[in-house]
Image: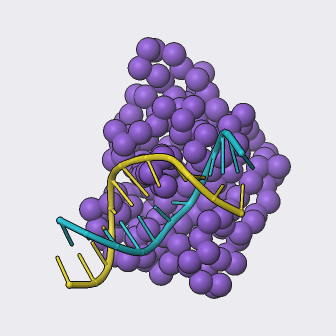
Chain colours: A purple, B yellow, C cyan
Amino acid sequence: MEKKLDREFFLKDVLGVAPGLLGKTLTRVYPDGRKEKYIITETEAYRGEEDRACHASKGRTGRTEIMYQTGGHIYVYLIYGMYWMLNFVTGPENFPQAVLIRCIKGFDGPGKLTKQLAIDKSFNGENLNTSNRIYICEGLKNISFKTETRVGIGYAGEEWINKPWRFKLI
DNA sequence: TCATTGATTTCA
DNA sequence: GAAATCAATGAT
């Protein structure tokens, strides 16, 4: 039987949660009742107001408010006017952190996976611990992963561009 | 390499 | 109000 991740899992620091999500099972229950499971294969960490690549680096606004909540909340936003990005908030309250889910098995790319999962604005603010339409379960054990630099953050400055905060399942 | 696309943020 | 920005994708 499937087992949801402990609530405490998302209260850890994002740099522990992001690689920890690799190999886990993302379960999506669609409006028509279908249930599909996907293996998470790539994540990225965004950590704190110091991290200039993090949306919260400019302070708390209407959009970034969700990142200041406790771990387990879902942060969804639209990029380039077309693609929804799926993020999981991590860490304690008032410390903005989030993990961007970049890839799941079979859907290689953040825009593609949200399209497949039918993620939209209505998921913003939802909680993985209580939602019955999207949640994370235990998955592969003894996984290995590699780190890379993050994508699409050329504006953040070298110090942040070079952080190895992108995690890929091998 | 370029067009698409709209919420969010910043400046007035 | 108006203008610039943007963690991407698919077609050319």
Q: Is residue A66 visible?
A: yes
Q: Quadrant of residue A14?
A: bottom right
Q: Is residue A10 visible?
A: no
- Front in this rendered view, residue A119 or A166: A119
Measuring from the top left, give residue A73's x and y in whole percent.
Answer: 39, 49
Measuring from the top left, give residue B9's x and y in whole percent.
Answer: 33, 71
Query: With A124 as the anchor, is A34 left or right in this view?
Result: right
Query: With A18 as the anchor, is A146 left or right in this view?
Result: right
Q: Quadrant of residue A140?
A: top right
Measuring from the top left, give residue A117's x and y in whole percent.
Answer: 53, 32
User: Looking at the figure, which quarter contains the N terminus of chain A?
Assistant: top right
Q: Residue at x 53, y 39 (%)?
A: A114
Measuring from the top left, give residue A154's x and y in whole percent.
Answer: 61, 75
Query: With A79 as the anchor, is A162 left or right in this view?
Result: right
Q: Residue at x 51, y 29 (%)?
A: A28
Q: Residue at x 47, y 22 (%)?
A: A30
Count of labels in the image: 0
Q: Residue at x 44, y 14 (%)?
A: A32
Question: Is A19 rendered above or below residue A4?
Answer: below
Question: Is A64 rendered above or below residue A115?
Answer: below
